[in-house]
Image (spheres, helix red, strand yellow):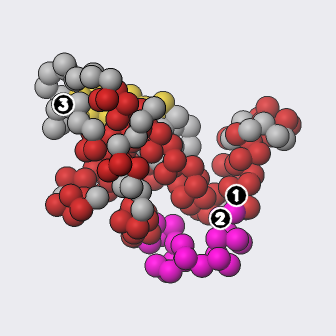
Amino acid sequence: MRVPDSLASAFGAPFEELLGTFSLERGLIQEGESLNSKRFLARSVIPHVKKLSDLFNRRDEESAAKGLAPYWRNSSNPENLRLAYFLYFMPPNLFRVASIWAELKRLGFQWKGRGELRALELGAGPASGACGIAAGELFSPLGLPDRGNWALIEQNKSMLELGSKWAASFFTHFASSACQNW
């Protein structure tokens, strides 16, 4: 797979700034500098990343058999758990979807649909798929319609709300002239 240079470099400082601003505005972090604080990350984010990684990779068979539902509910700090998922797992998943989109473009695929895009994202979490397609379309356009309707399906209501707000913010950012610098 070949990723265009513009996409490969799109997730640097401007993307990090967007993540930070969104996290601050939504109350996921208390201060703008939190994401640059090694202490905050080590105490409030990394433990949740490790636990989620163990669950996703089925290192803890007992917990893996129960799935994520008990961890979402029984976490000592569900807000930091969502923040950890949002900061650590969402960006690479978004990039993977955008990269696949770019590969479709490279292979000559063109969108033939008419009217409005209607799509479903199962296990949407923070809407990585929907946002990945938006990023892919920006950097490797296939001719998607300007309008779309996404159905985000997620088992955790708080994560679904976060994903819905993130997608709205991400789409708005991409529609603005600010993203033209990416």
User: Which residue: 40% across, 50% down?
Assistant: 8
Q: Residues within 10 Å of mark 1 (few under 14, many from 20)?
A: many
The residues colored magenta run 22-46
Q: Are the residues at dot 2 and dot 3 in contact (C-beta closer than 8 Å)? A: no
Looking at the rendering, which quadrant does residue 13 occupy? bottom left
Q: Quadrant of the C terminus?
A: bottom left
Residue 161 locus on image (x, y percent): 44, 50
Give the total of numbered labels: 3
Residue 117 locus on image (x, y percent): 23, 28
Looking at the rendering, which quadrant does residue 62 occupy? top right
Which residue is denoted by mark 2 in the rendering?
45
Answer yes or no: is residue 147 visible: yes
Q: Which mark is residue 48?
A: 1
Is residue 32 highlighted in magenta?
Answer: yes
Kind of residue sitting beneath label 1: His
Which residue is denoted by mark 3 in the rendering?
143
Give the camera-side residue of 180 and 83: 180
Residue 43 locus on image (x, y percent): 71, 72
Tell me if residue 122 comes above or below residue 178 in the rendering.
above
Q: Residues within 10 Å of mark 3 (few under 14, many from 20)?
A: some
Q: State which mark lies toward you, 3 or 1.
A: 3
